[in-house]
Image (cartoon, helix red, strand yellow):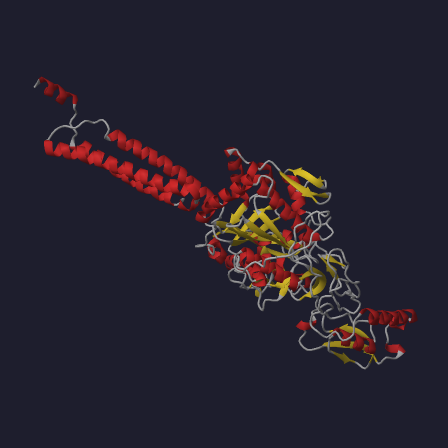
Amino acid sequence: MDKKKNKDKEEKIIKPKGKILLRLLNFIAFISCVFTSYNMFKFRNVGGKLSKYIYIAIGVLAFIYILLFMFVSKKLKKQRLLKRNIKKKGLYVSNIIYIIVTILITAVLMYLYNYLGSFNKKLVTYSTSLITLSSNDIKNVKDVDDTIIGILSDKNSPEGYIIPKEVIKQYKLEDNNQIEEYDSYQEMLADLYSGDLDLMFITSDYVNTFSANEGYENIGQETKVVMSKSKELKKHTVSKRATSSKGKSVTEPFTILLIGLDSETEGLSSASAAHGDSLILITFNPKTLNATVLSIPRDSYVPIACWSGKPENKITHAAVYGTDCLMDTIENYFGIKIDYYAQINFKGLVSLVNAMGGIDVEVPQDLCTNDSDRNQEICIKGGWQHLDGEGALVLSRNRKQLQNGDIGRGQNQQLVIQAMVNKVRTIRSAKDFIKILDTISNNFDTNFTTEQIISFYSVAEDIVSNGLAKDDADLVNIEQLYLQGSGQMIYDERANMVLWDYVPSKSSRDDIINAMKVNLGLKDKTVIKKFDFSVNEEYEKEIIGYAYRGGSLYSLVPNFVGLSKDQASSLASRSGVRVTFEGNSGYVVSQSAPVSKRVDLLSGGVKLTLSGSGSTDNKNTADNDKDKKKKEEDDKEKEEEELDDGSESKKIDSNENGTGNGTNSGGTNNGESGAGNSSGGESGAGASGSGTNGNSSSENADSSN
């Protein structure tokens, strides 16, 4: 009896109030178990052994809670049935410990999940500006009265329509002004410069976007900003591509478009995505660890998907209208579905390479360009070099010093990508890895879902395993693709000026498409059973698409001004242009179609206006000069020698001998430029020029690096 009494004294009675608290703690433990298990389950796509460990961890977590629940229930039931006091030890403490542990696990998992999710920016800040010519007296939006204001007609464009409409409503600009809708910024700028438009709404980053284009090199000085407005929008509300990757698995072959942004500041908080400076299309097969990499020349002359009628233009102009327009344009041209996109800031590339400890790469030649802050010049030497971030930026950005310009820059960017992939095998420190992730998060935006990003762990595991097994080999086998083509000066219907364009080769494009489809598993690979080689020659990887002789050039409207009626008729016949004359004699003083306009885009013929009756009195002073007339006759003979008779097709077929024969004195380009370093034809009469690999006989006016 004494022992029983002593035992009863040591035990404390659980009051009803204590029972409620114990039940509450056990319920909280249950909620913590479910919530933690859910957050663990979100990482199920990590793949490999980690996936198994995650399921095991969920099972262990659930098992511990079940034991805890049974223990508590058993004790409380025993007290109720036996009407005996139960011990305090193990009841409160076990539940509290379980709750604390699960909360800590959940906090870590949520942080990691949200951190990876930050690679896909949910909110983007868009900014639009109302601009006018610097000579205009308008100083602020209150001065805008009795003017013509231009906006984009695309109702889904944040900077060209959505925000401008809000500004128009806010300041009641529709009351005393005329609002005109345009299909493109190029058309608006052309009308602004010509005086047909007083003001226009355009992306606030318009100076960086358009100053690299011919005719707008000084747009920053020639225009001024009347007012600007920014707005933060959910990305998925203005871009169908923001959610287009859902349901796709990265463990299956996929295609991704890399968009390099040449910004002066780090980060991607603003909508600079539309101003892509570099375009790289990659297909990747996780099963074979094989990738194809194509650097798309920014001046590639292709149909623009988001423009009415899909007219051909520079592919970089599609980028101005957003990621959707750019990706649709590339998809349509190459016939390949693009699953994902990733935008990376060039300035962020400096931080990324530095975080990786630099890269080792063979630099093709000495190069110099401005640093990431554009304050001083940075130079790198040719040959094998260990480059820091600034050096890698010089190699990725520079194109002015390269013989083949933007094409060569694309190839150098592929070298940087390969070097960065290979650098992964040297990263051993968790601190360095976190630093790399921080850099990527700040300067990277994509439409990968968080689950898809998590899935990359298994792919990365395979890549690293492959690298460890083959220490001297590339972690990923990269096939270089090259879009061969020729340069040509073509009249831009929207900008109302002649611009240098890169006309791609159809044969080169076909080879590129075939290589991409093979890598994606959409086509069977052609097995080469026999080939020749020499042990005395170093093996070089084939560059797919490079072997062709440039692109098929267009027949263009020649410059008829200054020619006699007979000369103009002869030139028109050779150029495949139907002409009519106003007047009976004299020399051509004007023509209805602009020089270098594509012949296949003519609606009807070209009307040529003659100077008069042909008498001496009616000829202009220049045409009366005998020496000039003799020169014209000499030019005619030269035209007859250089132009092939009977060319009436809309496009001129490739010159398979690789010799540029693009004479432009008549505005017609017969043949294509040769591959490699072969030169284009001569440039004359302000018409079109031809070139190879981006080398036009007429200099590209692009002023960017």
Q: Where does the image place residue 49, in percent across and percent down from the top left?
A: 42, 41
Residue 196 rendering spot, x and y as whole percentages: 65, 65
- In the image, residue 107 sits, relative to residue 324, either above or below, namely above
Task: Please tell me which residue lies in front, 454 or 375.
Answer: 454
Q: Residue at x 53, y 34 (%)?
A: 428
Q: In this view, does 247 lie above or below 652?
A: above
Q: In which quarter of the image is residue 496?
A: bottom right
Q: Give the image quarter of residue 92.
A: top left
Q: In which quarter of the image is the N terminus?
A: top left
Quarter where residue 662 is shown: bottom right
Q: Is 510 left, or right, of 45 in this rendering?
A: right
Residue closer to the observer: 560 or 406: 406
Toward the left, the furthest residue is: 1
Q: Is residue 394 above or below residue 430?
A: below
Total count of labels: 0
In the rendering, at what x and y percent does residue 44 appear? Answer: 40, 45
Is 524 left or right of 300, judged from the image as shown?
left
Q: Is residue 322 in view from this perspective?
A: no
Q: Is residue 480 at all visible to an observer of this figure?
A: yes
In the image, farthest residue toward the top: 2
Residue 126: image location, x then y, percent: 53, 52
Tell which of 209 and 74 is nearer to you: 74
Q: Which residue lies furthest to the right in this view?
A: 626
Depth check: give the residue in front, 339 or 260.
339
